[in-house]
Image (spheres, grey):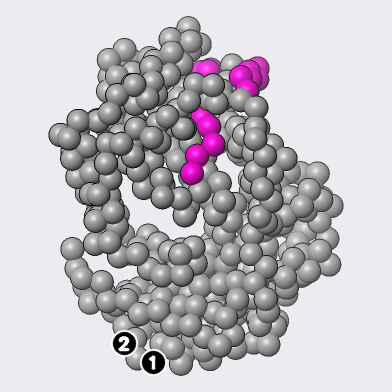
Amino acid sequence: MQKKEIEIIRFKNGLKAVIEKKTNTENIHIGLIINVGSRNENKSIYGMAHLIEHLIFKGTNKHQARYILNRIDSVGGELNAYTTKEKTVIHASVNKKYFERALDLISEIFQFASFPEAQILKEKEVVKDEIQSYNDNPYEQIYDDFEELLFSGHSLAHSILGNVKSLDKINRKQIISFYKKHYNTSNAVVSILGHIDTRYIKEIIEQKFSADTLIGKAAGSSQKKLVAYKPFQKEIFKDTHQSHCIIGNHAYDIKSNHRLPFILLTNILGGPAMNNRLNMNIREKYGYTYAIEAQYSAYCDAGIFTVYFGVDNKYLQKTISLVKKELQFFKNNTLSKTMLTQAKDQLCGQISLANDNHISTMLANGKSLMYFDKVITYQELFAKINSITPGQIYECAQMVFNEKKISTLIYH
């Protein structure tokens, strides 16, 4: 793996930047990560952060939407964005000779979005169609419904997309107010990766992100404390060919010392590799299900663990029992040295392969700087993974896989 050449820059206006030099590519990848997502919304404006992510491409004080959408695509680059519970991300990839063009465009839509009334009305309809698309897909919807139940009463509970009722009520004045509160330099990180001379990047970033409107106190994410939840067993009847099921629980936040051991445990249980225990002991052994997976998502102050599967209704209860049997395996057993070593090698290998995706690496650098105020190198990460003990895995299983705290949501 190529040694990382990383530089972190901190600007007087609160903006932070991380630059990683890669000499084995002719391209530049630029990301702007803003510390705002759906958890910053109250009930009256659910879907606001995601709607703004759409609207920032629909016109600025300088240019109309056609210019914005054509500026990067016309030179063969890519421009995109997405919203999560805690972050809004804008990113572009271009040949290195168009670096300033891409950075200029990202800074413009960040600083000078104008939110034309006609575009607001149009994009609301686009998002409503997106919501309907999710509602038509039980795999997508069941995750949203499970999180709403698991985080009930908390800012992490509601869908990133919002709902039709809340979208209809959002007006331009509210949009601009939300935008001014959260879209500022103290609330953002710029991440750049590519074959570029880092000596002049600081000057360019400082020049591009200099609007007075950007300077402000970081609003951050809502820190409403999670309340103890009552585990639930809920069934929702839908007209679907399969039964869909999620089994899960609260898990560790992103800064927890248990996070990496639990990532490793989740990977062993139901990660992307075909030899994970859920796949081998349920799909391959019995053929009950085509899709079965375990996931763990960590937020700044919370976490969620889930096992999802789709199955013919006649195999539903058998599959639930088999999943719970796998969870109990880790509660009742510590991993052998051989099993743990193999699991560590597998996770490190997956991370190493992911490093070949320059966009993913660039965004990971930016998120690391935002969450931890530093960039954790792969060498540091691998060292931490290799130091995980069987006792740490066992401790995670006792807490998260506790059958008294496990919840279940079923779509029939």
- x, y percent for residue 30: 43, 73
Q: How many marks?
A: 2
Determine which residue is flagged by label 1: 200
**Residue lying at 27% horizontally and 36% vertically, measured from the top left:** 390
- x, y percent for residue 84: 57, 53
- Count residues near mark 2 (Cα–Cα under 10 Å), then give few for <14, some for 14-19, many for 20+: few
- Quarter containing the C terminus: top right
- x, y percent for residue 153: 72, 40
Asked whether 249 falls inside the magenta stretch, the response is: yes
Residue span colored magenta: 232-252
**Residue lying at 53% horizontally and 63% vertically, measured from the top left:** 89
Determine which residue is flagged by label 2: 197
**Residue lying at 24% horizontally and 56% vertically, measured from the top left:** 383
Splitting the image into 4 quarters, where does residue 183 fall?
Answer: bottom right
Amino acid on which disc 2 is placed: Asp
Q: In this rendering, does residue 106 appear at all?
A: yes
Vertical placement of residue 123 versus 62, above or below: above
Amino acid on which disc 1 is placed: Tyr
Asked whether 289 falls inside the magenta stretch, the response is: no
